[in-house]
Image (tube, rainbow, N blue to C red):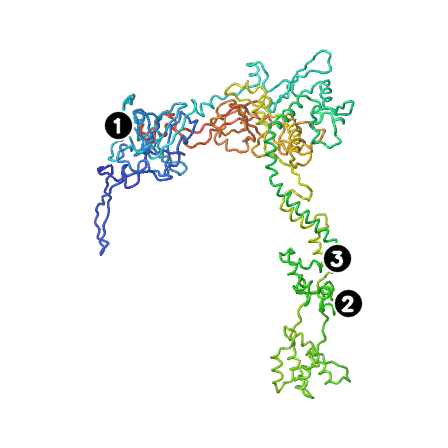
Amino acid sequence: MAVFYSHVEKALRAKATGPVADGRLQGDAPVTLAALGNPAVTRPTGAPYELFGPGDVERLAAGAITRRFPAPGASDAEEKKLALVEFGAPDLPWRYSPVQPDGGRLHPWLVLVVGRRAPDDVVLRPDGRVALGGIAQERHRLSGSAQWAHVHEVDTQCIARVVSPRALLQNTEYVACVVAAFTAGGAQAWPDLPPGGGAGAIPVTVDCYDRWSFRTGPQGDFPDLASKLHRVTPQQILAATGRPFGRAAVAYDYRSAVIPWRVILATAGALRVAPDPGSPDPADTPPDVTVTVEVEALTRRIVTPDGRGVVTAPVYDAPFTPPPAVPAVPATPGGWVDQLRTDPRLRGAAGLGAWTAIEWQDKITDAAAARSGDLAIAHDRIRQVALGVEASRSLWRRRVPADPAGRLAVLAPALGRLTTPAGTSVLDEVSGRTPMFARALLSSAARRALRPGPARSGRAQPGAGRFRAVLTQAAGCPDEPRDPADLHRAGDQDPLAAVRAAVYDAAQQDDALTGQVLDHLGGQPSAGAVVAALTALVPGRDGRPDPDALARFFQAQEYPDPDLSPRDWSGWVDELLPREPCRPVDIDRLSAAVAAAVDPTVATPPAARRVLATLPGITSLAPVEIEPELDLPLWSFLSQKSPDWLLPGAGDLELHGVIGVSTNPPFVHALLAGANHQSAAELRWRNVPMTSRWSPLRRFWQRADGSLDIAPIKGWPEASPLGSAPLRAPGVHDAEAVAVFRTPLFRRYPATVVYLFKARPGWAEPTEADLKDQASRVDPTFTGMIGDDITFFGFPVLPEALSDHWVVLEEPPAGYRFYAAPQVGPDGGLLADTGANFAYQRFALPVRVFIGPLL
């Protein structure tokens, strides 16, 4: 709920009751003093202060003004509304006023002056100040300035506003200036002049804090224009003009008649009168069979006696139907192909589409080129990857062996660049699985080191030095070695021989080290000495016994016996130095997986898949062709070039008339077929890489959600007639309801909200609460204009909905506005000359208009 206040003051200003000195209000604030040593001892006193006055203001801070109305530069402002300016700070209009409230009225320190740029009205000076002539002073008598400022509280927000009291004239240029209403000394900035006393008055120069210009439009505003709207029927237009509304006539002259004979065929345009089930529209009547036979003959192929083809009438279905469907093949009777070949009215609509494509050929080509703007990049990438694939296929067939080990030997250097589903490389996953399957073995350096010829590989057994043989050997786990501590022997085995054999194995067949250890053990070693020797010979990470462990063994003199005899201590190597885990590598599976990841000989090589993934919609290395959807709604062409084919008889609709009509899908489909027939040929001629049989122009109406009107023509079933569901794009209704207005309202108020609302029984106008029911509301999906003053709105419902729905127009939200003349009488308790009452009496409430039923 909106509430108006005449003024707002902060506490210090409200208590400033003293005299005015140099334009500044004086005040005395009560202060209580307390003793420092004893706060309980207090004494009341006063603190004099002085407020800033109008002479202390140099300019307004940036953002102080939050709105100007009319908008700066406006060229069609409403002459019935007052100019105004709004501020962010609620107290700003009165903050520096050098006067005190009187009877609930407080004069603001600044006012809004509106006038024409003339010596006797408003003159903008080069120094930024403004000279106000007699007319400006007379129209802005400062004695009434308390009415021009108020605070508007709405939804917990407070808006400070200053309006200009000057009534505006139509089609006039004005300048609005926010100026000081007081001099620096606190006097009124200019004297009050009586009505008619501005002639010859002395101009007054004042400070200007903000200014802008605007121009008013013709007489009237939204309520005036909306109140003139009224329903019109086709019968009323026929009675007034003698011509049927929404219907055109096509004249056809028979070619086969001996005597010239003409037949008139009724037809309709893109918009038509809504069908009446009880009265069939002549535009829907099929033409006589004689007409259809003659028209169909125009599309047949004609060949001269010497075999040359003759140019005949265009076959509009040819670019979109399969090659066997040539004109010599009879079309399915009643289907869209038959209609476009036999009905001159629909061929005429297709001809309008062809005309559109011819006139807009550059626009269509530019739109297609914009859609194919990235094709150069795609072509370049595809050419490069295709060349790389062919080269790699040749190398693959000549260089990569067929056996798994040999293929892996060639591809091993690539393992570090192949990723697994876990995000690691294949090299990380397979290296180290066996003691010999190291990263270095799978490098290109290992291939060079093991190539045949050098001594390091030449002295190997036959075939053992080949890289594939090395990989095979390294992929397996080594044989389990015999435990040197396994002293179990047959009963006749010499124990000393068993000890010597165990030491020799533990020393890794090192004769010198074996001799040193056996010499230290002596001829009759104890069990503890044997255990100590074998423990000292345990290999370290380098595969050799630890020198420090051997030194401790040779220095020791006593060896305590172990808990178990060496004969019972099998597996000591695994306990002291556990064997590394070994997971053999399946060379065949690894080779197959690696080859599949890089094989260029498959239908779509992996490299090609990676490149095509960067090109949405392209799935092969074949030359790229696109299926562009061009955002060119063709209704606008008819509106500009042939408006009578958009709505026949549109010019007969009287001013301020509103009529309900319907879309005409058969006409739209025929027009789009002709437009695509022509544009497809043009785009092919200009080398636009478009998929064959594609229809790039599928939009006739400019729908808000961007949806199309027709499905791709190449998918139209031949037996389906124009306008039928199989030919329409998904989500598009059959015939749709359209409301047509002939009014300047939408040109002046283009943001007007228009919608349908389900009527209640008895056609009572919906209340504010009713309009909150979104289920009963239907918003338009497309809109357009015919000429300068005919506007239409299409709704996603059948035309019959216009018989039980209101057409609702809502004034566009343009901020809060105020009429120049009072609109209501004064409310009780409010003084007639306060700012709150002034605003209340002139506040412009939003206007809503209901029209219906249109059918």
**Residue 685 vs residue 209, the one in the foreground:** 685
SS of the residue under disc 3:
loop
Q: Residue 301's quadrant in the figure?
A: top right
Indicate the amino acid at tag 3.
Pro
Q: Residue 394, percent across and down?
A: 73, 51
Work out whether mark 2 precedes mark 3 in sequence or the reverse, and give the earlier one.
3
Residue 802 shown left or right of residue 220 in the figure:
right
Image quadrant holding the N terminus, namely top left
Crowd rating for badge 1 (residues with CA inside 10 Å; few <14, some 14–19, many 20+): some
| Image vertical order of residue 448 relative to residue 355, above or below | below
- Farthest residue, direction top: 259
Q: Residue at x 62, y 58 (%)?
A: 424
**Residue 623 vs residue 741, the one in the foreground:** 623
Residue 854 shown left or right of residue 572 in the figure:
left
Name the residue carrying label 3: 401
Indicate the amino acid at tag 2.
Pro
Q: Residue 14, percent across and down?
A: 28, 39
Image quadrant holding the C terminus, namely top right
**Residue 127 vs residue 661, the one in the foreground:** 127
Residue 19 shown left or right of residue 257 in the figure:
left
Name the residue carrying label 2: 462
Name the residue carrying label 1: 191
Q: CA distance from mark 2 to mark 3?
A: 20 Å
Depth-wise, is mark 2 or mark 1 nearer the camera?
Answer: 2
Q: CA distance from mark 2 to mark 1?
A: 123 Å
Work out whether mark 2 precedes mark 1 in sequence or the reverse, and give the earlier one.
1
Indicate the amino acid at tag 1.
Pro
Work out whether mark 1 precedes mark 3 in sequence or the reverse, and give the earlier one.
1
| Image vertical order of residue 667 relative to residue 528, above or below | above
Q: Residue at x 76, y 22 (%)?
A: 304
SS of the residue under disc 1:
loop
